[in-house]
Image: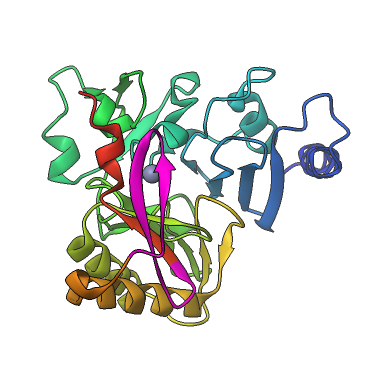
Amino acid sequence: MSRLKYYMIVFLIISLSCGNRKNDWYRISKIDSKTFIISEPKSSQNNSCFLIMGSKEAILLDSGTGENKDETFKNIISALTDLPLTVLLSHFHFDHIGTTSEFDCIGIPEIPVIEDKMTVDSLLHLTNTETLAQKTATLKISKLFPVGKDIDLGNRKIKILYTPGHSKESISLIDNENGYLFTGDLVYNGLLLINDCDAYVRSINEIIKNSNSKYKVFGAHGRPEISYERLFKIEEAIENYRSGRDTINPFRQVNFFGTTKSIYKIGDVTFMDGYTDAFNND
Ligand SMILES: [Zn+2]
C-alpha cells in the first residue's frame, strides 16, 4: 500500500469515527490493516459489512442497507481499497444487498439453493420473500465461489461455510490464518431470527467445528464482535428450544413488521422462530 493511500485511509477512519464529515452515516473500524468493519449505526437495522483484502483482490461481505442517500457505498469502499473487488452476500435480505447494484462484480457461493435459481444469463431474480422487502431485486452474477475450499485473495485465504438456519442461502466466512469468523445473520449481538431450527443448530456446530476459542467472531448487526463463548450459549439455547419446543413458553409477544410474533428467551439468548411469516407477501 502506498504511503499516500495509507494516510487517506487513516484520515477516512478518523473523520468517519469522529463524525465530522458532512455524512457520518458510516462508522469504519479496523480489525487489522487488511480487514475493516463498515457499520451503519444510524440505519434501521444497525448493520455491519466487512471488507476483507488480500494482496491481489478484496471481498466485500454484504453491501449494507442502501438507506443512506447522501453518498454511495462504493465511494466509501473505494477510499479503503483499489484492489479488484467482489461483493459476496452473506444472504439476500434487503439490509445486506442495499447497494449491490453500485458494484461491478457480484459473487455467489456454489450452493444448489442459489445456483439453481440463476438464469442462463447469470441473473438472480430475488423475490419479496427472499429479500424481505417490498421491492424485488435482480443481481447480475460475475463470479462463483467454492464452498468449504480455500479462496485465495493473494497471501490470504478465506473459506465459505454454508450455514443456513437464518435463511436457506446463508453463508459464513472463515479466515483460518488470522482466526476470524464472519457469521452474517447466523449469529450476532441482539435478537436472533431463526427460520429453520434444525439447520440453525447444525450451522452453529459447523462453525464451532471449524474454529476454536482463539477466533474472533463478527456478526452483521449490533455490536459487531461477539465473544466466542457466545456461540456455545446460542447453540445450547436453540438446541433446548428445538428439543422442548412444546413446553417452552414465549418470553413476550411483539409486533414484528406488522405481525404478532413470539420472542423466546433462554438464558440471555433471545430469539424469534419462524420470523419469515411476517414477510410472506409473494
Ligand atoms: Zn437476514
237 over 103 or under it: above or below? below
Query: Visible in this render: residue 36?
Result: yes
* Magenta stretch, residue numbers: 250-269
Quarter of the render that holds ligand 1: top left
Which residue shows up at 39% across the image and 60% down it?
271
Task: Tell me: 211 left or right of 99.
Answer: left
Q: Position of residue 189 (x, y in %)?
A: 53, 61
In the image shown, does 239 or 140 lie closer to the viewer? Answer: 239
Figure quadrant of residue 27: top right
Query: Visible in this render: residue 32?
Result: no
Which residue shows up at 31% across the image and 46% down it?
275
Q: Quadrant of the C terminus?
A: top left
Q: Position of residue 83 (x, y in %)?
A: 56, 36
Question: What secondary structure predominates along the stretch shown in magenta?
Answer: strand
Which residue shows up at 46% across the image and 39% down it?
62
Q: Quadrant of the N terminus?
A: top right
Task: Tell me: 107 left or right of 60.
Answer: left
In the image shown, does 128 or 208 lie closer to the viewer? Answer: 128
Q: Position of residue 116 (x, y in %)?
A: 11, 34
- How many discs appear? 0
Task: Tell me: 235 left or right of 252.
Answer: left
Which residue shows up at 15% across the image and 42% down it?
113
In the image shown, does 191 or 205 lie closer to the viewer? Answer: 191
Q: Is residue 205 magenta?
A: no
Q: Is residue 257 magenta?
A: yes
182 over 239 or under it: above or below? above
87 over 38 or under it: above or below? above
